[in-house]
């Protein structure tokens, strides 16, 4: 009887979950093929797993060894490269008060057994290596010596047993209470690059240690994964769900599958609410839009067509009110990223609304992202739209175009920052700034924060002063400019991720600065050309590993121009752009004054003569406009001069020398001049000094003085409360 | 005495206390204009010769704000420090001037000129300062109990909480407790000020405790007399927000051609409208005190 019951309970119960797969692989010969089984033990915070890995040597080299990433070992102790770099840049990842108990603080992964499938046991051939530094205690890269090299275009099949200990959530990995986020959780084979790939002269493994300021790099392939967790846990992951099985031990096993991806992450928590909706592309995009976008990016309407996608949100209870905003953000991402760069090719997209304090937001994995929001976000705050569109956008930059995030983080983060801002601008316009008043969002912008003395305010928070109950828009075009300018001189943009001065420099140079730089490039090329450049580059490098040189080649090819100067100025240096109008001056041209040759004889003209001559003639002005380059970045710029008779003159300056001057002889006076009037240089250090007027205009200062007086009157009225 | 009678009498007295209202209002305006002057000067020097002026006229520009912040590092912190200090001065000044306002309620039928006002203010100045210190200690205790006490109690739980809903409600609860505590101290302080002048009490401590007993013993009515004119004064800000035609103002100011008549007139009208609101707020401030005086006098007779 027990046996019958046991058999019955072990029956595969397809709860209508078999994924409808319409996906067709775009990769003829995947480099990796993982067939994996993994089990989560929530009580012990432990993962045990086994996989069979088929690895294809796609190069002409005989490969004598294998390299693996063991990312979880970054959290093993305070001597890992990750831990040391964190301590150097910002102290502890969490404040001392927030440090988890010792027993929860550490994480690791052990390869229990590694052998050639059906063959030699290679476990004793495993050694830890540290290709980036001299830290022999770092265990995030493992080398396995092979008994025989893998021949060119040959394959090897490995069988690997591993155990992973999850830390209390750190660096977007681990657990928090009964919530688990498993990222970089299994021993992952590195990338072998052949000669000529990403500019290499000779082939070799590109397998870096896990640093504080780096992300990941892996090859495309197939992930066929069975995940087992307690049956009351809601599980979400990369890929399509093929089946779901209830087991007799109170667990459930989920079979997930995805082709053409280079990573696999998953989550489990009993308190998620699962909501699934379909992105019906033909409802979301009209035929007129298809035609318009096809013309814009120079493809056929057929090439511009999108596809339906099943989108699943795992949302926290209490954020149900944000569900519609979350889905609208993903749908806008699917629509506009698709129209710009090409359809999102996969059947599914899963996104996870992570718990507060979990340190697992905000991150991207193929067909799976983590996002977050607050309990009560402002209506136009781009929370959660901003992070949702950004993390979704990584499906295109990092997911489909697989750059090396260790060496060229800017190629995905920066490109995605640019793309995200374009999508947000198109779908939503600009966001508003908000302040929290009693925890509730109020549209406002604080110019400054008034500190309160300890007596009688006993560490009450400072008071933000500015305009309240009005939306101050944050234009997407120049978002992050302030952050960029603060860190502009720390590093060149192009740098390995772990070689930036600090986390702030890494952030600026990987994200905001690149977004601004690509906006600037767009200004020089024109919106249409830029869109075509990005589309060609994206399509050309899907499912491959590009480098910056590949993007530069696409820019030059599609634009038909030599834009190398642009990349020299703005990618390969830390030079800042700052052009200014230094002087706008008009002098009345007076009559002759001094000694002149008249009819072959010297004649002296006095002041009186000069004045008389000037009175008799029509007035003429000599206007002088001086333009200066205050920054070190060189860029060609336009200069526009306005005259008081309504006339406008446009000049072009190559921007190379420190200054230039334009002079005009006209009956009208110059009233103002602007350099870079269209603000092509989104990276400009100072837009305000880009223009100059001959006469001072105090209207703005007066208007804001009047408003500041009223704000301070009310502030001091409130201060009188304490009298 | 009923609440209605106290308020009616208070409002009637306040109508005859315009000298006090004007002095409070003008003192506040002077402080605000002084504190904002460095901001005006720096905006003018940074932007006065730039076409960015036109963008700032049409509304705020975050690009301009970034330019200003980068070109003048530390400027905003400097202005904030100045404003904080002027705010502290404002607390002291309001204490000193309160005596001048309240003294007029003894003989509201008589006209109070500025000299009379300042003489009365001077007479009660030292007592008001002592009372102010007691009040500050009261406020400090409220802040201590909430920002240090309640927040510390809940800090560990909040740092571990995975759900932001209860965290929001707890934070709101702490803020509400803080607000109620501050309002209670302010209620007691208002009646203490009244008591100090009405009884010509020389001891600030006695006035405070007398007022505390009075406020607790007649809490509902004391609160209503305090709250009604105060809330009416606050409501003026709502009126200002609803009525001010910002769209028209900004489009009129933002036109490229400088008009020697139109723009100064619009700015003057805006300024005038704002000052009407502030004068009104001070009128309701004085009406609050006058109503409390009437209630106090009526209740203690």
Image (tube, coloured by chain):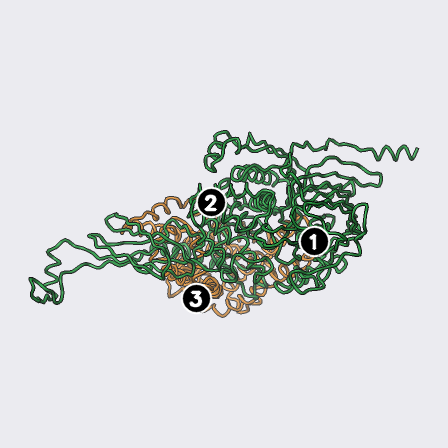
- Badges 1 and 2: C-beta atoms under 8 Å apart? no
Q: Which residue, given by chain and number where applicable, does mark 2 sit on? A: A557
* Residue hosting label 1: A69
In the displayed structure, would residue A44 be above or below residue A320?
Answer: below
Q: Earlier in the sequence, mark 1 or mark 2?
A: 1
Circle 2 Cα neighbour tier, 10 Å, few/some/many (<14 / 14–19 / ≥20): some
Please state which of residues A290 and B168 is positioned toward the viewer in this rendering: A290
Quadrant position of residue B152:
bottom right
- Say few, some or many: other residues with alpha carbon within 10 Å of mark 1 (under 14 / 14 to 19 / 20 or more): many
Chain bearing mark 2? A
Task: Determine the image quadrant of residue A235.
Answer: top right
Q: Closest to the observer: B219 or A12?
A: A12
Q: Nearer the viewer, mark 1 or mark 3?
A: 1
Return the chain for callout 3.
Answer: B
Report if the CB atoms under discs 1 and 3 are less than 8 Å apart.
Answer: no
Q: Position of residue A24 (x, y in %)?
A: 64, 34
Residue B120 got which mark? 3
Image location of residue A494, percent across then percent down: 53, 56
Q: What separation in Å lies between label 1 and label 3 (alpha carbons)?
A: 81 Å
Q: Nearer the viewer, mark 1 or mark 2?
A: 2
Q: Is residue B256 left or right of residue B141?
A: left
Chain with colour green in the figure: A
| Res A264 visible | no
Q: Colour of chain B?
A: orange
The alpha-carbon separation of the residues under discs 1 and 2 comes to 36 Å
Label 2 sits on a secondary structure element that is helix
Percent x, y for residue A453?
54, 65
Q: Secondary structure at mark 1?
A: strand
Q: Nearer the viewer, residue B26 or A487?
A: A487
Return the chain for callout 1: A
Residue A671 tag number: none
């Amino acid at each position: 009887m027990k046996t019958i019951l046991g058999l019955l309970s072990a029956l595969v119960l397809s709860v209508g979950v078999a994924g409808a797969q319409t996906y067709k692989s775009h990769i003829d010969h995947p480099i990796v093929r993982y067939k994996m089984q993994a089990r989560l033990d929530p009580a012990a915070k432990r993962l045990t797993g086994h996989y069979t890995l088929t690895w294809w040597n796609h190069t002409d080299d005989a490969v004598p060894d294998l390299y693996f990433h063991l990312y979880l070992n970054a959290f093993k102790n305070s001597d890992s490269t990750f831990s040391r770099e964190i301590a150097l840049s910002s102290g502890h990842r969490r404040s001392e008060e927030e440090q988890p108990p010792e027993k929860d603080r550490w994480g690791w992964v052990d390869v229990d057994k590694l052998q050639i499938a059906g063959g030699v046991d290679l476990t004793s051939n495993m050694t830890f290596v540290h290709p980036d530094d001299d830290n022999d205690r770092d265990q995030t890269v493992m080398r396995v010596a092979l008994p025989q090299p893998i021949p060119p275009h040959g394959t090897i099949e490995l069988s690997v047993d591993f155990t992973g200990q999850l830390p209390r959530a750190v660096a977007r990995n681990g657990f928090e209470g009964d919530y688990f986020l498993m990222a970089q959780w299994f021993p992952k084979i590195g990338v072998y690059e052949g000669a000529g790939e990403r500019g290499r002269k000779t082939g070799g493994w590109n397998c870096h240690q896990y640093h504080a300021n780096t992300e990941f790099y892996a090859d495309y392939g197939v992930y066929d994964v069975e995940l087992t967790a307690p049956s009351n846990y809601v599980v979400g992951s990369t890929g399509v769900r093929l089946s779901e099985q209830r087991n007799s031990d109170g667990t459930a096993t989920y079979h997930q599958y995805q082709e053409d991806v280079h990573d696999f992450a998953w989550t489990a928590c009993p308190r998620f609410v699962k909501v699934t909706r379909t992105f019906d592309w033909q409802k979301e995009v009209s035929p007129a839009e298809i035609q318009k976008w096809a013309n814009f990016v120079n493809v056929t309407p057929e090439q511009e067509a999108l596809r339906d996608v099943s989108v699943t949100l795992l949302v926290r209870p209490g954020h149900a009110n944000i569900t519609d905003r979350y889905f609208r953000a993903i749908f806008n991402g699917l629509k506009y990223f698709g129209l710009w760069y090409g359809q999102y090719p996969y059947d599914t997209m899963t996104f996870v609304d992570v718990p507060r304090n979990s340190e697992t937001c905000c991150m991207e994995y193929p067909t799976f992202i983590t996002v977050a929001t607050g309990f009560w976000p402002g209506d136009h705050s781009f929370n959660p739209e901003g992070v949702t569109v950004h993390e979704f956008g990584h499906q295109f930059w990092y997911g489909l175009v697989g750059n090396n995030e260790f060496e060229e983080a800017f190629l995905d983060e920066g490109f995605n920052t640019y793309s995200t801002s374009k999508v947000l601008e198109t779908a939503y316009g600009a966001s508003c700034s908000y302040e929290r008043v009693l925890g509730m969002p109020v549209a406002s912008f604080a110019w400054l924060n008034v500190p309160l003395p300890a007596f009688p305010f006993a560490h009450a928070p400072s008071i933000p002063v500015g305009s309240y109950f009005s939306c101050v828009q944050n234009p997407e075009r120049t978002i992050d400019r302030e952050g960029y300018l603060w860190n502009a001189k720390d590093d060149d943009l192009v740098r390995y991720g772990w070689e930036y001065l600090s986390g702030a420099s890494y952030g600026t140079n990987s994200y905001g600065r690149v977004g601004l730089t690509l906006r600037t490039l767009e200004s020089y090329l024109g919106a249409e050309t830029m869109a075509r450049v990005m589309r060609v580059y994206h399509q050309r490098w899907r499912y491959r590993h590009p480098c910056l040189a590949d993007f530069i080649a696409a820019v030059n090819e599609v634009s038909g121009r030599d834009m190398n100067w642009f990349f020299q100025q703005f990618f390969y240096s830390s030079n800042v752009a700052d052009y200014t109008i230094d002087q706008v001056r008009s002098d009345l041209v007076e009559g002759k004054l001094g000694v002149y040759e008249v009819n072959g004889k010297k004649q002296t003209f006095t002041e009186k003569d000069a004045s008389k001559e000037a009175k008799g003639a029509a007035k003429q002005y000599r206007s002088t406009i001086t333009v200066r380059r205050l920054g070190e970045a060189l860029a060609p710029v336009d200069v526009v001069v306005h005259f008081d008779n309504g006339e406008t003159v446009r000049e072009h300056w190559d921007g190379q020398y420190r200054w230039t001057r334009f002079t005009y002889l006209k009956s009208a006076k110059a009233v103002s001049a602007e350099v870079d009037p269209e603000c092509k240089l989104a990276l400009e250090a100072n837009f305000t000094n880009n223009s100059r007027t001959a006469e001072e205009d105090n209207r703005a200062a007066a208007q804001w003085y009047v408003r500041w007086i009223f704000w301070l009157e009310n502030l001091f009225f409130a201060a009188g409360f304490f009298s | 005495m009923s609440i209605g009678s106290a308020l009616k009498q208070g409002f009637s007295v306040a109508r005859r206390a315009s000298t006090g209202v004007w002095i409070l209002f003008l003192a506040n305006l002077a402080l605000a204009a002084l504190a904002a002057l460095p901001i005006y000067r720096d905006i003018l020097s940074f932007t006065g010769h730039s076409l960015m002026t036109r963008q700032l006229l049409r509304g705020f520009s975050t690009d301009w704000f970034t330019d200003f912040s980068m070109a003048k590092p530390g400027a905003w912190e400097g202005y904030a420090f100045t404003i904080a200090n002027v705010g502290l001065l404002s607390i002291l000044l309001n204490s000193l001037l309160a005596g001048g306002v309240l003294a007029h309620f003894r003989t509201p039928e008589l006209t109070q000129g500025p000299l009379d006002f300042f003489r009365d203010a001077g007479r009660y100045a030292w007592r008001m300062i002592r009372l102010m210190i007691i009040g500050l200690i009261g406020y400090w205790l409220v802040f201590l109990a909430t920002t240090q006490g309640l927040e510390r109690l809940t800090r560990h739980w909040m740092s571990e909480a995975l759900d932001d809903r209860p965290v929001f409600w707890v934070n709101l609860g702490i803020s509400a407790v803080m607000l109620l505590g501050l309002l209670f101290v302010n209620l007691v302080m208002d009646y203490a000020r009244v008591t100090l002048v009405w009884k010509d009490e020389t001891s600030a401590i006695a006035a405070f405790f007398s007022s505390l007993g009075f406020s607790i013993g007649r809490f509902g009515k004391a609160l209503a007399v305090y709250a009604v004119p105060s809330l009416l004064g606050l409501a003026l800000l709502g009126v200002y927000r609803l009525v001010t035609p910002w769209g028209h103002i900004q489009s009129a100011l933002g036109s490229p051609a400088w008009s020697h008549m139109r723009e100064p007139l619009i700015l003057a009208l805006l300024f005038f409208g704002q000052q009407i609101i502030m004068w009104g707020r001070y009128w309701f401030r004085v009406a609050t005190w006058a109503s409390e005086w009437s209630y106090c006098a009526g209740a203690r007779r």
